[in-house]
Image (cartoon, rainbow, N blue to C red):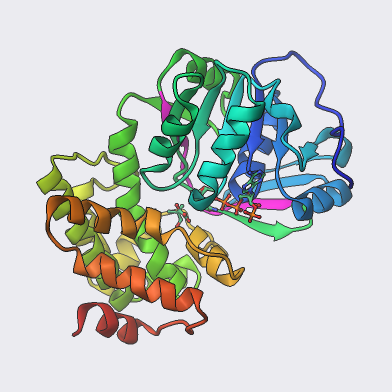
Amino acid sequence: MVAGPGRGRLPGPRLSRVTVLGAGSIGCFVGGCWQAAGLDVSFIGRPSFDRDIADHGLTLSDYSGWAASLPPDRVDYRTRPDTLASADIIALCVKSGATADAAREIATNGRPGTTVISFQNGISNVDVLERLLGDRFTVVRGMVPYNVAYLGDGRFHKGVAGVLYAEDCPETRSLAAAIGQSPAALKLSDDMLGIAWGKLLINLNNAVNALSGRTLIEQLRERDYRRVVAACQREGLRLLRRAGIEPAKVGAVGPGLLPWVIGSPNWLFRNIFMKSWKIDARARSSMADDLAAGRKTEVDYINGELVKLADRLGIRAPVNGRIVELIRNAEGGAPPLAPAALRAAVLGN
Ligand SMILES: NC(=O)C1=CN([C@@H]2O[C@H](COP(=O)(O)OP(=O)(O)OC[C@H]3O[C@@H](n4cnc5c(N)ncnc54)[C@H](OP(=O)(O)O)[C@@H]3O)[C@@H](O)[C@H]2O)C=CC1
Ligand SMILES: CC(C)(CO)C(=O)C(=O)O
């Protein structure tokens, strides 16, 4: 489909007008679920998704068997930032490296006063948005705890359980109420920075998953991979303590217990912890998706955040630093690492 006027919107009461900026895996799933729940949603993204959605519409599904679909003529997907001007809420879903450019598009095309929710991994995207959008826009931190995979032909699949989070403010309160019960339901919190750091500790698995070349389930079954994740988390927790930052609990396990759970022996991890998590067989981390697609990853915004924090504290973060190096090698074409090889490369034993 050519760029230009979007296809129609779902009829019904106009609640909040939402524009998803960066409509890829997360943006199409979240925006699609919100539209299926009755919200007025438009999507801004790339021509390849536009073409797929123009041909097939949007099909959304999750690990529990839930599914919904929106026909092509009901999905307003554009490749130009036209609908930023009419949005009440902008859901920002670009990868971290694209944040500054997206912020400039919002500053140029958006309506001052609009609420911008960053549904991105990492910590510093919100700082970039606040710096570039100043006090003309309301920048709000969000968090996506689950994995979404693009299966082709307009099909987006949520492979892990969980509920979206965003900072509690009047705009997000009415958004959450409008969404209601949905696979992309929104919970509100007044400790989003703590939640972002808690999520970052979990996201330390992203790089290991990407380096393994395996699905999340196949990777998490291997204790050597988990030992590396646990070491990244222990280093992260030490740095956060030194910096006086308190990560919040994200998911079933509190931050302090994460390395213990992740590093536990196979009999315990596989039989108790893995069985209680709802992860479907196809799910991989978003960093694995990036490597597979030959894109630059977000490692600088995840493990790299801890390396930067260590620098500010005048200490070192050798484990996370090594992971950043290995991801750079992988971005350059280095092959996946077997469990023992990754353990040796990071922990040296
Ligand atoms: N995928 C997942 O399962 C999860 C992802 N996250 C986080 O969510 C965020 C989004 O990830 P994900 O959905 O996987 O990313 P995707 O790459 O699937 O989607 C982002 C899309 O936005 C496009 N884009 C970038 N800049 C612009 C722009 N200015 N205007 C329009 N489109 C733009 C990208 O195109 P191009 O590639 O050309 O730049 C890409 O198609 C990341 O921070 C990620 O860490 C969090 C939890 C899980
Ligand atoms: C949901 C999770 C933790 C899955 O690895 C993720 O955040 C990602 O893939 O970026």
Q: Is residue 323 left or right of residue 245?
A: right
Magenta residues span 155-167
Q: Position of residue 169 (x, y in %)?
A: 43, 17
Residue located at (57% from left, 19% from top):
114
Observer-nearest of 278 and 141: 141
Residue located at (81% from left, 27% from top):
9
Q: Quadrant of residue 203?
A: bottom left
Q: Quadrant of residue 205?
A: bottom left
Seen in the picture, residue 166 relative to 156 is either above or below; the reply is above
Q: Is residue 320 left or right of residue 102?
A: left
In this rendering, does residue 263 appear at all? no
Q: Is residue 210 magenta?
A: no
Q: Quadrant of residue 225?
A: bottom left
Observer-nearest of 293 and 254: 293
Q: Is residue 161 magenta?
A: yes
Magenta: main secondary structure equals strand
Q: Quadrant of the C terminus?
A: bottom left
Q: Position of residue 149 (x, y in %)?
A: 61, 57
In this rendering, does residue 332 appear at all? yes
Q: Is residue 290 left or right of residue 190?
A: right
Residue located at (46% from left, 53% from top):
278
Q: Is residue 95 left or right of residue 166?
A: right
Q: Position of residue 237 (x, y in %)?
A: 18, 52
Report the label total.
0
Residue located at (64% from left, 18% from top):
16
Seen in the picture, residue 251 relative to 10 is either above or below; the reply is below
Seen in the picture, residue 24 relative to 21 is either above or below; the reply is below
